[in-house]
Amino acid sequence: MDSSPSSQEVDPAYLPPGTRVGPWCVRGWGGRGAYGTVYRVEREGHEQDGSFALKLAHFSRDPRFTREVELLSRIQHPHVPRLKDHGVWHHRSGAFPYVVMEWIEGTPLYEWAEGHDLTGRQALRVLAQMARALEATHAAGAVHRDVKGDNILVRLADAHPFLTDFGAGHFRGAATLTSRLLPPGTAAYRSPEAWAFVHAFARHPTVHYPASACDDLFALGVTAYRLVTRLYPPPTHPQERDAEVWREGGPGPHAPRLLNSQVGPELDALILRLLSIAPVERFNGQAREAAEALEQAERSAGPEADLPLFPREASSATAARAASPRPAASEPPPAPRPARSAGPAPMRARAPAAAPARVRRVVLAACVVLLAALAGMSSHQGPQEAQLLRATDACEGGSAAVGDSGLDFPIAMLSTELPDTCMPVVGLRMPDGPFPGQRTPPCSKGGEEEIRGGCWYGLRNLAPPCKDDAYEWQGACYLPSYPPRRRSTSGSP
């Protein structure tokens, strides 16, 4: 504990050089996000060991840092920054946790690519290495949940990439730190099934979307698409323009080769596979399979793969288009960083961007869309649902760390376990018992039927396979019956 007067007076978000944080001495600044600031530090008495990245919380006793420490301690991989130390910095305004990691002299992926005449072979190599980092993450029972170009730092000395900023990550058994329907993440990189989940369960009081390895692989696909075309694929958010390409049976995004003819056919096909609409088609949710496919493509690619993806003599029209990503899906600008250097991604602010809609793939058989279909909103979003979507985006406009902003009503986590597989594109099967809060017999409200201890509405105009939110039972489709919600009539105390 450093109790010197000078250290007790400084703002934890703006530590000047020379400030001590435990045994670490601040030497420079790395970047600032909504929940923490990254500093370049050296260990006092061990300056010969070089620089490290210290991320200090903005909020006293922030539990996000405990979870990040636990997650990083589970992952040992050459493409993930090594955890060096962690502790608590005692300040007059509270106890601020910190985590110390390997310092990376590098730049974010997209910035690095634009300055190094990226070739197709290099793109395949970097993507394969990131898939290997995800393989190690998933093997630890975790998901990253915020894979994107700005969270991939490429070391300047040898082009060695690192997957950084695990502040949004989650692992089996970890405490739930947010009440939002969707977990932290950057909207432009969200999978179609994540936004389908929002559409299907917007009014459910207890459900929380369980991000899976398939979500990480989709985000890697968006990163790859942006890397080789300098454009984002169409947004997956259901309310954004062109989002219809992500609907079940839709065409998906344009092939990268149509936007950049320098992209080779193998790289093109692998990117489209990562961006498959059906989660299981993304290498069955196995990052190892994705890495092996990318590595094989790198080895077998011909000499054309060594040509720049963006020749300097490209037409001015192409250059202008490439320099202007889709505004709706643009990634937030990186936080300021020292010239030509960066630590592990400093939890930069994320802008509300685009994301997706598909309403057939739903995990957690204990969840269901409630009053939406009963109110005649089976395929269109009503004002309350649209408000929820906007609120979710707004809550996720902070940093890559787990947000602590809530929605207008509480949504508790139904399960803390991560799904073992990607969410299948199948109809919903009738659960063994009623859902929490569902009506139970006697069932008499407007044609309710009693099924397995709960009251259900039969959808007489639908037959299996049941679409969207309906559950199948004995050759018919049903929706559960819930009592109406009433506003509180009590006044302020």
Image (tube, grey):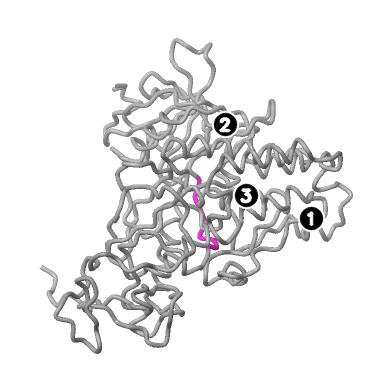
Q: CA distance from mark 2 to mark 3?
A: 16 Å
- Rounded to the nearest whole Å, what is the CA distance between mark 2 and mark 1? 28 Å
Question: Residue beneath label 2, please?
Answer: 79
Secondary structure at badge 2 equals loop
Say if mark 2 contacts mark 1, CB within 8 Å.
no
Residue 462: give x, y in percent of width and height.
42, 83
Residue at (44% x, 56% y) in the render: 396
In the rendered structure, the answer to whether residue 449 lies left or right of residue 9 reads: left
Indicate the quadrant where residue 85 lies. top left
Alpha-carbon neighbours of circle 2 within 10 Å: few (<14), some, or many (≥20)? many
Majority secondary structure of magenta residues = loop
Residue under numbered circle 3: 223
Q: Is residue 361 left or right of residue 224?
A: left
Q: Amino acid at mark 3?
A: Thr
Say whether residue 269 is magenta: no
Nearer to the camera, 212 or 241: 212
As helix, strand or loop, the secondary structure at mark 3 comes to: helix
Q: Amino acid at mark 2?
A: His
Three-letter code, disc 1: Asn
**402 and 368: which one is in front?**
368
**Percent from the top left, x then y, of residue 310?**
81, 48
Q: Position of residue 429 (x, y in %)?
A: 36, 67
Magenta part of the chain = 348-355
For image coordinates 51% across by 54% down, the residue present is 186
**339 relative to 469, above or below:** above
Depth check: give the residue in front, 308 or 24.
308
* Among the two numbered marks 3 and 1 on one chain, the one whose residue lies closer to the N terminus: 3
Q: Tell me the crowding category of disc 1: few under 14, some 14 to 19, or many 20 or more residues within 10 angstroms, Cα based.
A: some
**Mark 2 or mark 1, earlier in chain:** 2
